Amino acid sequence: MQTLDRAEESIHVEAPPQVVYDLVADVTRTPEYSPEVDEVVWLDDGGPRVGARFRARNRVPAHPRVSWHNKPIVMAAEPGREFAFARTEAFAGTLVWRYRFEPEGTGTRVTESYEIARPIGRIGWFIIGTLGRDPDRTTTMRQGLHESLQRLQRVAEADAASPPSAPGTDRPGDGAGPD
């Protein structure tokens, strides 16, 4: 049977901590950098605050037709410092994702981590390994950490280089209006 416990990885991003925090805390932007998340919507009034909930649609990158939904809850929302959420799924335990932002030179040291708060049961591992077609979830999760940080770095650095939008305007290509 597979096991998971925790993993952590860091990267330097040439953008201020607040810029990187704003990107991560706007969970609707998660598909821009996560290799497994396809869509996220706020379930509450929206916005990053402790207790807020959102709905995410995930998929297995190697098997794009295998997908599932979950409803995480925000556990920490400290602008420019930390953003964390926990998701609990039937048979799949509770997983806490955490992002920490520390000033580093002219940019930010971003640390992304996950920790198992409640272990995945035998049925969950059967679903993940067999139906989810992921026989080595530990490796998949660690590769996902690395890939998401690489993508996050590119997106955050592009955000930092772009002038802020005027109120009432949207970013090009965000799907909010015509491009």
Image (spheres, helix red, strand yellow):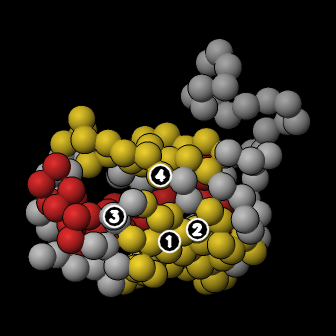
Sequence order check, earlier mark of 1 and 4: 4
- Label 1: few (<14), some or many (≥20) within 10 Å? many
Sequence order check, earlier mark of 4 and 2: 4
Q: Position of residue 108 (x, y in %)?
A: 60, 76
Q: Element under label 2?
A: strand
Sequence order check, earlier mark of 4 and 3: 4
Tell me what residue is drawn at x 60 percent, y 26 percent: 175
The residue under label 3 is: 91
Which residue type does callout 4 highlight?
Asn
C-alpha gap between disc 2 and disc 1: 5 Å
Q: Closer to the camera: disc 2 or disc 3?
A: 3
Label 2–label 1 contact, CB within 8 A: yes
Q: Element under label 1?
A: strand
Tell me what residue is drawn at x 14 percent, y 67 percent: 136
Tell me what residue is drawn at x 12 percent, y 76 percent: 1
The residue under label 4 is: 70
Tell which of 86 and 29 is nearer to you: 86
Q: Position of residue 28 (x, y in %)?
A: 60, 45
C-alpha gap between disc 2 and disc 3: 19 Å
C-alpha gap between disc 4 and disc 2: 12 Å
Q: Which mark is residue 85?
A: 2
- Label 4: few (<14), some or many (≥20) within 10 Å? some
Would you place residue 24 above or below residue 142 in this image?
A: above
Which residue type does callout 2 highlight?
Phe
Q: Closer to the camera: disc 3 or disc 1?
A: 3
- Label 3: few (<14), some or many (≥20) within 10 Å? some
Q: How many marks?
A: 4
Would you place residue 88 above or below residue 38 in this image?
A: below
Q: Element under label 3?
A: loop
Q: Which mark is residue 97?
A: 1
Which residue type does callout 1 highlight?
Trp
Tell which of 22 and 14 is nearer to you: 22
